[in-house]
Image: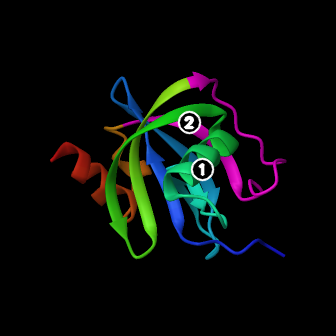
Amino acid sequence: MSKPTYGISEAIVIQDNRVLMVKQRVKRGDVVWNFPGGGIEPGETPEEACIRELKEETGYTIRVLRLLQERVGKYTYMAEIIGGELRCDPGVAGNEDLMGAAWVGLDETDRFDSITRPILQLIRA
């Protein structure tokens, strides 16, 4: 049984014209590229959840820079890496749906969908 969550928190990390993403099987069965993030646990702020989820999913420690967007319990932050190295371990509790993590070129438009594309457009604006 999964823990209750109090919204979703995710991070956008861009370096060298690439964005950090995770390849994930979503509930509807599709495989998509998403920004790393996940559920906010009881007692966590959205920022704390963002930092924890990114570490669990990618191996990186981040610093949250600013809130980009908040929509119906979903928080999207700009962040920067301050430590760690890229790794994705589906064996970690909560990572069972992950199939990998990678730096994706901002010009690789086929990796972005109707959820991720508008957020990247926010950054470019």
Secondary-structure class at tag 2? strand
The quadrant holding residue 101 is top right
Q: Residue at x 57, y 47 (%)?
A: 22
Q: The disc labelled 1 sits on which kind of residue?
A: Lys
Mark 1 or 2 closer to N-term?
1
Please determine whether, in this image, residue 15 is positioned above or below residue 99: above
x, y percent for residue 87: 69, 32
Quarter of the image for the N terminus: give it: bottom right
Residue range corresponding to the magenta coloring:
83-105
Foreground residue, 125 or 46?
46
Label 2 near label 1: C-beta < 8 Å?
yes
Please determine whether, in this image, residue 121 is positioned above or below residue 42: above
Foreground residue, 12 or 46?
46
Please determine whether, in this image, residue 103 is positioned above or below residue 120: above
Left or right: 40 as drawn, with respect to 91: left
Number of numbered discs = 2
Give the residue at mark 1.
23
x, y percent for residue 71: 36, 71
x, y percent for residue 11: 46, 47
Q: Residue at x 70, y 75 (%)?
A: 4
Give the residue at mark 2.
102
Residue 62 falls within the magenta-colored stretch? no
Left or right: 10 as drawn, with respect to 85: left
The quadrant holding residue 115 is bottom left
Distance Cα–Cα, label 1 vs label 2: 8 Å
Q: How is the image coloured?
A: rainbow
